[in-house]
Image (spheres, helix red, strand yellow):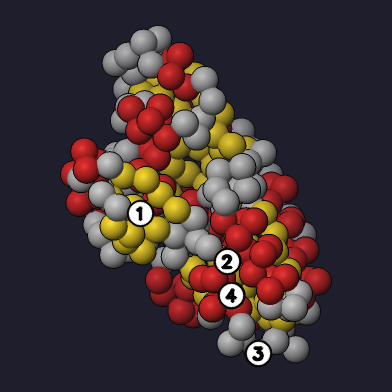
Amino acid sequence: MTVTVVTDSAASIPGNLVDELGIVVVPMSVIIGGTVYPDGQLGLDEVMARVGEGVSTSGANPGEFLTAIEPIDGDVVVLTISAQMSSTYEAARTAAKMAGGMARVVDTRTAAGGQGLVVLAAAEAAARGDDVDTVVAAAERVIEQVRLVATVENLARLIASGRVPGVAALANRWLGMNPLFEFRNGTAHPLRPAFSRDGAFERMLTTWRHTMVPGARLHVSALHAEAEEDANRLLKQVEAEVVPATSFVAPFNSVMVVHTGLGLVGLAWWWETT
């Protein structure tokens, strides 16, 4: 029986890979001035330009997941953004129950590029014809290994979002510096800031280098919020040192950028050992 992988739009996966692997993406939403905009309907610049109108976000709801799941013929694996960051995981579980338990729901415990790499590993296993248990195992293997580090231009949106406990206390201490974070165990954790943006990129690369596994295959993505040139440069530096099995640059979605602000650049990766 075929397996279809479903995820939410927090996963930063290029459209060509979504189409190639038959991944089903359920959109999250941005709410501006009381109007709901499904992810992707507004550009990131427009979303941030309208912050003054009152901006909030909404995870995918059970009905949206049910609409995605019910037409699928075969087994379904749903891979969501971290349950600690969004209600999306619980919504997917509710939808799976409403669908008679036909879907397996897994919390990726990460987001953006990290989530995207988890989803791609599962979708590739499904494309090989693996059964549902093997597809879930492929996702769980990456969940245990994937790393995600990122820098933001300032802390304003992270403070406003409340998604990183204690971050407001760092605002004055980090004034004029480039904040760095690592996403692990479901939440974002502050790292020592850098004195410049280039310094932040070098620190991300150093973190990546320290995880190298001789003989392993690298899967890597560079993510960004309206900073594609920086993300491309970061990925090229990785590719100059290791030839990845998977590599791509992907933009943040509009929901994520509400919580981080424009200018974010990040690196997500995992090492596949035989």
Residue type at tag 1: Val
Residue type at tag 2: Pro
Q: Residue furthest right?
A: 133
Task: Tell me whether circle 4 and circle 2 mark residues in contact (CB < 8 Å).
Answer: yes
Spatial separation of the CA atoms under disc 4 and disc 2: 6 Å
From this viewpoint, is residue 246 visible? no
Query: Along the polypeptide, which appears first: circle 3 or circle 4?
Result: 4
Front of the two marks 3 and 1? 1
Identify the secondary structure beneath mark 1. Answer: strand
Task: Tell me whether circle 3 and circle 1 mark residues in contact (CB < 8 Å).
Answer: no
Front of the two marks 3 and 4? 4
Residue type at tag 3: Asp
Query: Along the polypeptide, which appears first: circle 3 or circle 1?
Result: 1
Which residue is labeled 3 in the image? 73
Percent position of residue 152, x then y: 37, 33
Spatial separation of the CA atoms under disc 2 and disc 3: 19 Å
Query: Along the polypeptide, which appears first: circle 4 or circle 1?
Result: 1
Which residue is labeled 2 in the image? 62
Quadrant assignment, res 257: top left
Please give the label number shown on residue 30. Answer: 1
Spatial separation of the CA atoms under disc 3 and disc 4: 13 Å
Please give the label number shown on residue 66. Answer: 4
Spatial separation of the CA atoms under disc 3 and disc 1: 31 Å
Q: Which residue occupies 73% across, 57% down?
A: 140
Identify the secondary structure beneath mark 4. Answer: helix
Say if 189 sits above or below 91 in the image: above
Percent position of residue 149, x then y: 51, 37
Query: Along the polypeptide, which appears first: circle 2 or circle 1?
Result: 1
Task: Tell me whether circle 3 and circle 4 mark residues in contact (CB < 8 Å).
Answer: no
Query: Along the polypeptide, which appears first: circle 2 or circle 3?
Result: 2
